[in-house]
Each structure stands twice: as C-alpha cells, then as structure tokens.
Image (cartoon, grey):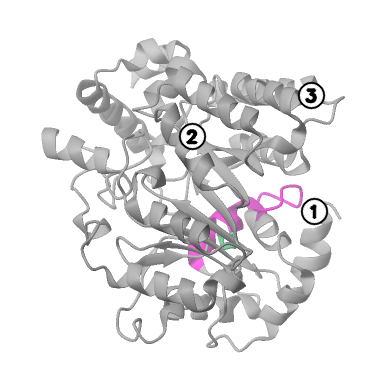
Amino acid sequence: MNDLDYWRQVLNPISKSFCAAKWYNATIWLGSGQTTSCHHPPAHSINLAELANNPKLLHNTPQKKQDREMMQKGQRPAGCEYCWRIEDMGQTSPSDRVYKSKIYPIEDLHRAAQTPPDQDIDLKTLEISFDRTCQFACSYCNPAFSSTWVNDLKRNGPYTDLVSDGRNHFTHEHRGSQLYTFGEENPYVDAFFKWWESDLHQTLQELRITGGEPLMSGYTWRLIDWFRDNPGRSNTRLAINSNLGMPREKIQQLLAACQGIELDIYSSNESMGTQAEYIRDGLVWQQWVDNMEYILDSGKVRGLHVMCTINATCLETLPEFLDYLVEWKKKYGDGALSFTLNILRFPSFQSPLVLPEHIREHHRQQLSDFLARHKHHSYLQEHEIAHITRLYDYLAMVKTPHSESFDMPTLYHDFKQFHQQYDRRRGKKFVLAFPNLAEWYNTL
Ligand code: SF4
C-alpha cells in the first residue's frame, strides 16, 4: 500500500490525528532527563520520583499519556505541529505520522488505539542520547546538543541581537542539558540500564543511539559491550547516529565490536564540499566521503542512511548531493543506502522559508529537474520521492517556519546577525561559501 493510501485507509479511520509513535517510539535524553515521541515535538522533562521503581516512566510521562488520549479522540496535540502543517497543505503530502506508524503491524496500531491512555506501554523503537559530547558545532545545532557549541559560548560569550531566538539557544551553555558527567551517578542512565536488563532488551525492536556524537560516549561502548557479552539474548537491532567525522580506526573499532549485531548507521549531511563544511562546522568533506565508502565497502552494516536537515543554505547543492548519493546506490545497491529530507524549523531564521521567493523558485526548479533526471530508473525509494515532492510543495505553500514564528524582516535580521557572528567565531566567510546567496545576503 502506498503512503497516501496508508494515510487515508489505515491511519485516518483510527483517528484523524492518530500516530503510533506516541505509543511505541521515543527519543530520551539521559543527560538532561527529557523525552519526546519523535524528533519534532519539543522535549519535556521526565519526573525523577518513582523512576527508580518503574524505569518505564522514562517513556510513559504524563504529557505523552495526555497526548495519546487526544489522539484517540482525533484531537491534535500541539507538540505535533510539524505534522499538522504538512497535512494542512493538502492531501498530496503525507506527514511523518504516516512514516512513524507504518513501521508497526496494523494490529499494534489498533491495540494502541484501544489501550487506556494512562497505561504504561512497552517501546518498540527507541532513540537514546547518553550525553552531548560532540566534536562538531553545526550552524543549526546549539549547546544543548554539542559540547563544542558549549565551548564556543565559553570562549566567545553569547551570540547577541538575535531577536527570534526566543528559546535562547545561542546565549548560554545549557547546563541543564548535561546534568551529569560520565562516571558520575546519573539516575536516568541507571533507569535505562535497569529497564534494558529487565525486559527492554527483549521487547525493543530497534535501539538507536544519538548524541552529541555517540561514538564519543563511554555509555555507547558499554552498551555495545553488553551485546558482545550476551550473544543471542536480544534480537534488538542497533542503530547509531554518527557524524562520521573521525579517523578510520574508530569506524573499524565500531564495525569489529558490532560483529554479529544487526547494525544500521545514520549520518547527517545535506550539501556538497565547502558548503557542507561551512554548515556542519567540524566536518571534513573528504573524510566523511571516505568513511561512508569504507562502511559501504565493508558490507558489515544492514543499512547506511543519510539524514538531510533542510535549511536555507543547503538548497543550492542539495540536488548535486542527492545525485552523489544516487551514484552510491548504483554502485552498492539501492538497499545499501537511503536518505530522508527533514525540514528545519528551529532556529527559524535558518529555515529555507527565509529565502526570497525568486531563490525558492529556483530551488524548486532544481528539485523538479532532479526528479525528472531520475524518473526512469528505480534508485529512489518511495519515501525519498515523497520527501523531495514534499519539500517542493513546502517551498511554495508554507509561509512561516512554525506558528510562533516572527515576521520575515525579523528573520532576515537574525539570519545576517547570526552568520556574521558565526563567521567571526569559526573563521568562515558566508559570501565565499554561498556565492549564490551573496547578493541577497549583502542587502540584509
Ligand atoms: S510530530 Fe508527527 S510523527 Fe512525530 S509524534 Fe507527532 S504526529 Fe507522530
């Protein structure tokens, strides 16, 4: 069944807002004690009381139970605004609640819809972050997720005059995002390993570790060691989000340690060469390419996936980047590599919607040309075509990055303010990295 039919014939009859992710999927940040259902809704805090007795409360928070009840009644939880905005564009672009539900059997969806909303649910897919240690400081990231971003603020002080940064992502070190250092007792990490040992290792289908950069966290290696020391005890697939910005030996160490484990690797990138190095500060383009090819050549992973964060600056070389991925698909087989396009909403001044209409139109044409180029062969998966089409529509139809967004003059102001300060701190030059945007940028 294709995605649109699934949306109309499976999800909507359960309820117009039902999404299985609210029951079966979670992202949990153990460094800060926060969780959400998928990466779109804002994170909320996990209550420490009772956690030691019932580690399932890492996932089953009062907020999620309330959202489940709303979804059972067909009401829209506010935190899922990303999906509602996509759905309100019309009936041609399925939102992520399709992709986040489709991965589970239909019986499980009906079971969730009928389960009393206050009941604890066992997770099937989990993304977990142990800490924020990371050697990158990407432009669209912030200190809550990267220790290198923290160092930028420690060294250079807060970013100033960003009017639309209502959540103060760039003004302080976000100490609350890393309440404990490695080796220090962390009740959230303790609860996770307690739950993992008791039954999570049996009920969970996929465990995905995110960061920071997970390969820099000692807890990631503790978990990998658990798999090595307990062969056959768990059927959970392991997935790791990695920026792949490390020496080859680290990748070799990971692949060797994961022998016998079903492993997927997810890496982020969305543009080519110099532009990628500008956006994802810390990345060395050639090292990323070499590590990707090394993993593909090794044949040791179940799948390699590229997550593209669609922001204002990546669009010029995004089609070329996707062509690059298609070449890998041709060489290694379609199943070896896939990609997703995730449209950035925060920080809103880096949204692709800040671009003036004529530049957005130019990018729509490029996307259309890309799809035309690849129309007659089967290297693109259905969800990949849907994501490109969705972005094509989004650039024309959506006017503001999110409902609390500021007016465009404010976002233009912040775009310039941010990049001027980013250039000074990181030794970069926006107009050299993005000559296609220089004329517009200089008018801001
Ligand atoms: S944002 Fe969308 S995909 Fe995520 S939990 Fe909400 S409805 Fe599901």
Q: Which residue is mark 1?
A: 4
Magenta stretch: includes residue 90 = yes
Q: Is residue 342 left or right of residue 42?
A: right
Residue 161, position in %: x, y?
A: 20, 37
At horizontal 47% and vertical 35% (from top left) the residue drawn is 251
Q: Is mark 1 within 8 Å of ligand 1?
A: no
Q: Secondary structure at mark 2?
A: helix
Q: Which residue is mark 3?
A: 374
Q: Is residue 282 left or right of residue 360?
A: left
Residue 438, position in %: x, y?
A: 40, 13
Q: Name the kind of residue labelled 2 in the image.
A: Gln
Q: Name the kind of residue labelled 3 in the image.
A: His
Q: Is residue 189 above or below residue 281?
A: below
Q: Residues within 10 Å of mark 1 (few under 14, many from 20)?
A: some
At horizontal 37% and vertical 67% (from top left) the residue drawn is 44
Magenta stretch: includes residue 340 = no
Which quadrant holds residue 266? Answer: top right
Which quadrant holds residue 205? Answer: bottom right
Between 197 and 256, the residue placed more toward the observer is: 256
Instruction: Work out whether mark 3 precedes mark 2 in sequence or the reverse, and give the earlier one.
Output: 2
| Span shown in magenta | 78-95
Q: Name the kind of residue labelled 1 in the image.
A: Leu
The mark total stands at 3
Q: Which residue is mark 2?
A: 252
